[in-house]
Each structure stands twice: as C-alpha cells, then as structure tokens.
Amino acid sequence: MPFHSHLLANGLQIIGETSPSARSAALGFFVRTGARDETPEECGVTHFLEHMVFKGTPRRTALDVNRDFDRIGADYNAFTSEENTVFHAAVLPEYLPQAVDILADILRPSLRDDDFDMEKKVIIEEIGMYEDQPMWSAYDRAKRLYFAEHKLGNSILGTPGSITALKRDQMHVYFQRRYVAPNIIVAAAGHFDWPRFVELIEKHCGHWQNGAIGRDGISEARGSDRFEVMTKDKVMQEHVFLISPGPTADSPLRYAADLLGMAVGDDSGSRLYWALIDPGLADSADCSFHEYEGAGAFYTSFSCQPEQAEEDLELVVDVLRDVQDNGISAEELNQARSKVLSRVVRGSERPKGRLMALGMNWIYQHAYRTVDDELRAFESVTLPDIRQVLDRYPIDQMTTLALGPLARLNGPKA
Amino acid sequence: MPFHSHLLANGLQIIGETSPSARSAALGFFVRTGARDETPEECGVTHFLEHMVFKGTPRRTALDVNRDFDRIGADYNAFTSEENTVFHAAVLPEYLPQAVDILADILRPSLRDDDFDMEKKVIIEEIGMYEDQPMWSAYDRAKRLYFAEHKLGNSILGTPGSITALKRDQMHVYFQRRYVAPNIIVAAAGHFDWPRFVELIEKHCGHWQNGAIGRDGISEARGSDRFEVMTKDKVMQEHVFLISPGPTADSPLRYAADLLGMAVGDDSGSRLYWALIDPGLADSADCSFHEYEGAGAFYTSFSCQPEQAEEDLELVVDVLRDVQDNGISAEELNQARSKVLSRVVRGSERPKGRLMALGMNWIYQHAYRTVDDELRAFESVTLPDIRQVLDRYPIDQMTTLALGPLARLNGPKA
C-alpha cells in the first residue's frame, strides 16, 4: 500500500503516496482558505498573503527564498482559488529535506511593513493586467452575478480599492485565523521515504499553532437566470460567460458532470466545437464543470466578433437546451470518457500531478483515491447518470454575462 | 535493456524505449526537414506542410482526423523548427494501434487544392499574429542578421508574400523530396510492446518511398558582430535580441554550453536576473543555448521601457564581457547544474518527455542515451569545460538587433 497518513498533535494532517518508480518528489502545503473565507473588508487578502509568503521570514529575506529554491533546482509555485491556497515544489529526492525546510519556513512569514507596501503595488498591477483579459473579467463578474450574495462570488484578486485599503495587521489577523495547523494538509508524492518525511514535518511544523477551523455559509448555492451586458469600448471581441448549476464537490454525480461538461464543450470534437469553432463563428468556445464545497457549476463561455454575438448566443443556448432535453449520445459519452481517462492517466505520471489529486481528494472527499479508483469512477458513468445530473441541475438555466463593445445584446428567445 | 531499434527495408528508422512502470505511451514521427531545407521560392513551405498534414488523406477528411484522434483521447500536436518537423501523440497503451494508424495515414497527405487555398489564409493570419509579438519578430530578424546568407537564418513561417506565391505543386515536390522514408524516424516511449509496434509501423509505413536524403550547407556557421535598430512605432517596449556563437549539436561541449546559458540567463537567480529583473530594470531578460547541425548559438534577449534600453544594453554587455573574461563561479555552475538535473529528471517522468529526448538524440548524436547518461554528462562538466566553450565561442561577440519605438540606440562602448 503506497498511501500513508499521519496526524500531528497540533492538528496538522500529513499524507503521502510513495512511488518507487518515480525519479523526483513533489510536496505541497494545502491551506484550506480562499476568497470565500474573506470578510468584505478583507477582499483580496488571501491572494495578497500568498504573495507575502514568498517575501521572507525571520530566517530568510525574499532574496534568500529565491536563492534557496534555486540552489536545489526546485520547480516551485503557488496558487489561490475560491477555497484553497496551495504552495508546492518538485525536487530531486535528495533535496526533499531542504524543500521542506524552505516551504515550512516561508509558511510562517514575517509580513514586514516594507515588503507589504511594496507588494501592494505588485498586486494592484496584477489586477490591472487581469482587467486587460476580457474573458477573465467576464468570469469574475459572471460569478458575482450568479452567486449573488453567496461568498463563492467573492473576487480572488480583490479590487485596487480593497487592496489599497488593506492594512498589514488585517492580513496578520487573517493569517492567524486561517493558517492554523488543523486547516493545513501537507502532502508528498513520488520518490521519498515516508517515515523520514513525517520526521521532517514534525520537526519544522510541530510547533505551529492549533486553532478552530471551519467555513461559513456552505449551504448549497444555486444561481438564477440573470442576464447582463457590460459595455467596454476598448475590448475588440464580445466575451460571453454563462453559468449553470452543477453537483457539489462531494457528490457522487461529479464524475458524470465532468464527462457532461467535456461532451458539451471540450476544445476539440465537442458540441460547442462543432457548432461554433469548426464553422469559424467564434474564436473560442468551451464548457467545463467546476466543483466547490456546497456548490458546483458549469462554466460555458465564448468570444467572437461583436456582430456575431447574438447568433452565437442563440447557438450556444440551443446546444444547452438540446442537451437538457435529449441528453448526449452513447458515442459522445464514450469519446468524453476516452479523453478524461487519458488525461487522468497522463496527469498521474508525474509526482506533481499525483500531489494535486492527493491533496484535493483529501480536502473534498476526506479520502485517499488511487489512480485506478478515479479511472473506475469515470468508467462506470452511464447515460442515466448524465440524465440525473441534468434533472437535478438544469444546464439551460443559466446566468449570462456579456462583456465587450456591444451596448446591448438580445437574450435568447424562450 | 529497454532500448530497441529496427530499420525497415525502405530506410525508415524505428526506435523505442519501453518503460513498464509508465501508464501511457507516446509516439512521434520525426521528419528531418525544416526551414533550412527550403529554397528561397519555398520559403515557409515546411511549416505550411505541417498544417496540411492534418487536412486529410484519401481515407480521411480533416474532420475525420480530428474525430479519430478524439475518439482515442489522444493528446496530439506537431511543430516545425529550423531543422525538424515533428508529429506526436500520447495515448493509453490500448490505443497505440489506432494512434499509429492515424499518424501514419496523415503523413501521406492528399494536399487537396481546396484545403491548400483555405489553409493559406490560416497561415497568413498566423504570420500576422506572430508579427504582433515583438520579441518573436526580433528573434526572426536577429537570426537573419546573424546567420546572413546561411540557410539557418531562414524564416520558419515565411512571409505573407512567400506564402501567397506558393503553389500546391511546389509543396508536393517538397514533400516528395523531404518526406521520404530514410529521412524519417519513428519513435515510441512508455508502456508498449516493441515487437507489436514494429509490426504496426511495417504494416502502415513499409510501402513509403525510399529516396536520397541529406542537407545542404552544414559547414559550421558563425556570425559577426552586427548591430541594427528596427523602429516600430506600434510597439510599446524596446525588445533587444543578441546572438553569440556556440558549439554544434554533436559537440561534446554542448552540456557545458547548456549550463553556461543557464548561469548567465535563466529566469531566476542568474546573472541577468540579478542585473536586470531583480532591480526592476527590465520586464524580461534571458539567455539560453541553442544547437543545430553544424552550428550553435547563445540567444540573449531583454525587453524594457524604451528610455531604459541603452542602460540595459550596457548592463547586458557588461555581464557577457565579465563572463567572457572571468567565467562563472563554482557556485553558479553548481546552481545551474541542480536546475538542469532537476529538469532532465522531471521531464523524463512522462513518456512524451522521453519521446522527445529519444528522437532528438537519435537525430543529432545517432545514439541512444538513457536519462542517467544525460545526468552523468551534466554532472561531469567542470569550470575548465566552461572556459573551453568561452575560448572557442566568445559569448561577447554578438549580433544585436533592437526592435521597438526607438529611432536609434547607441551600441555598447568598447
């Protein structure tokens, strides 16, 4: 059995999957905190804090952090989502102790005032950069529209206003509340020695503070069929983002939902591909399933010449309505399944891919799942399962947001 | 021994590395033809032909090609360089026969007139898209300037003029000259059965035409220290591209050259990183070693605010001169080595990574090299090896091309 787990006295959970045929090791700290865990005054603090983690500790300056990762040739990075903040590194097996040392150290950051003020500018620039990506802006706004007052609609980056107003001590309070040991999972995958790994984590993280964890408002969030047009003159193409409901992250229907999203809107050979991309009616078109704690959603989007937007929107809605009424065919299900199985297997061949699966499965299913467990779950999805997803989560009941040069856009006919 | 090779009667070379612990298989057709193998009238034909390969055969329309790859969940793609055109796919082991069937079929394309005329527009749009990427334009022009009349300076995409003028029959003539069996290597890596793979290739490719192969002008190409400024008003930042000579692809000095490039200009912790990126003087700055048949080069580039360009160029030239005069330190060599070793190992964990290494090593070294062979080669590089690279290929003797809003830019002081 290549899976191991161990709970430290302070509540820190350690998990690992050893794979002797791997030639490297990946490790990650999964902090169960994201944009949905922020108060309105803290808007954007999770992502800002992710940046600050790399700015140093009592033992290391920001330069030292860079240099120490570089010395061991680490491939390292971090990301922030609605629900998680993940710090990860892939290294040769002999450098795992150093990688643990660096990651564990930076996860107790100094949050120095100078660094805080400097990084504020970087974050505000990053927000500006994302604002220049129309589809990202459409996504951010569509989520707010769909989730309405639910905290899953919170913006991950925040706004220039919220970031400017944020104070160092607010970040520190947030850190103390959310970065407590029981709210963090440390995982490793690939070629490494489990008992030694546990020892290292115990040594570096055993003193981290215990604390209360949890999350507000995890009741199931369902959106409505709102429609909004945001006019942006500087944008060339019209970008349309649609959100429909889907199963939650712990639902047994999530595998069927994944396959359904792929059949509807994968980047090749899907319904949307044949309706919009192949005939040259849109630059991009896709649909995929996204899962959260207490919520799930299908994100459908396309971009095209403004004068083409109304026809394209009709076509997209026709696709979604047809799928809602008639489901998908056995051949479509099989094709989506082939693609997913291939992606799962290829993704599992690298320690980094296994690390992410390991961490996310622990967070959302509180369970260890082998690659074969995942494959079997996708293999066993039937057309009636797809029907069940559609019956419980109508894919044609969507919130629609259009962003681009158009001043108005007619919604689809009933 | 996991390596296998077999030569078909028509000259087609088959090679493979089996890895029972892998869960997928990758295969590729490496056609030893690229931009440098084009006559002036054929400029851009190699890349255009790569596109046409996906447009169908007597047995398959373009739609069928898409659909057939999708049915088996293949991760497939192709690329064209100065010297090679590579078609590859990664699949689950049970789909290898279908993947061979599709790839072998499309490599004998129909080149239908309608598809040819249609794809011409796509290629011209693609050229326009690349023209909008200033650093790519700078690279394309710097290469022409450095290699001068040598065919390694040929543009991979061609120009709107050369593509417009190209006729279907010219492409067919080029295809018949360059896509002959002895000019192609078929490789596989990962989880697959070697005897069965050879059978499949024999069945699908055994009838491919034999023919003469070879390449003109492979004498070592060395550039000069030219300096040119191209003014482009629409570009916001100044983009500067420098090319210095380096060892050829079959030189034993290539490993030292790789490490030298990384110490000078990797994207973190390198000389250029500390000189330009860390102090915020440039948006991007890097240096890396590139190898060809009969040539090699260090490509150094940076982009910055126009008013900063002159100071940055001085700083970059100072770095290159200092490296030329004093070499790099033992610590810099070790740090670059850690990064390269880590990348080689992590890259080798996926069949696709091994496939590329396998094909390229066969093309350039006519040899099979294990991951451990590669690691040992990097491990054994010493500071005197770095010195030897610099003595034979002075890194501070460069061709410089600046592209951006500046009307003039002073070259570095002697």
Image (cartoon, coloured by chain):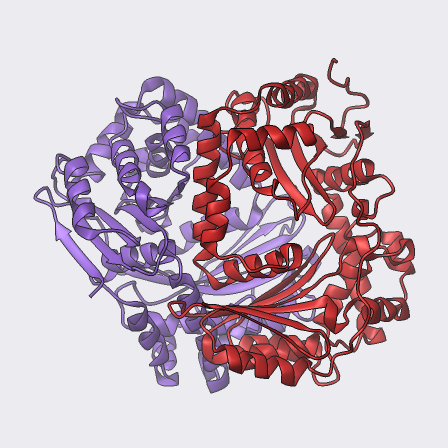
Chain colours: A purple, B red
Question: Residue A289: image x %, image y %?
Answer: 41, 64
Observer-nearest residue: B183 or B275? B183
Observer-nearest residue: A303 or B172? B172
**Residue at 29% in and 62% down:** A249
Question: Residue A76: image x %, image y %?
Answer: 39, 41
Q: Is residue A18 visible?
A: yes
Q: Is residue B204 above or below residue A239?
A: below
**Residue at 46% in and 38% down:** B337
Query: In which image quadrant can residue A118 be found?
Result: top left
- State left or right for residue B81 relative to residue B188: right
- State left or right for residue A103 relative to residue A353: left
- Number of labelled discs? 0
Question: Residue B396: image x %, image y %?
Answer: 69, 24
Question: Residue B388: image x %, image y %?
Answer: 62, 31
Q: Is residue B169 above or below residue B202?
A: above
Farthest residue in the left direction?
Answer: A9
- State left or right for residue A256 relative to residue B60: left
Observer-nearest residue: A366 or B31? B31
Query: In which image quadrant can residue B57 be found?
Result: bottom right
Q: Is residue B88 above or below residue A170?
A: below
| Quadrant location, the N terminus of chain A | bottom left
Observer-nearest residue: B221 or A398? B221
**Residue at 88% in and 55% down:** B162
**Residue at 45% in and 52% down:** B372
Q: Is residue A396 visible?
A: no
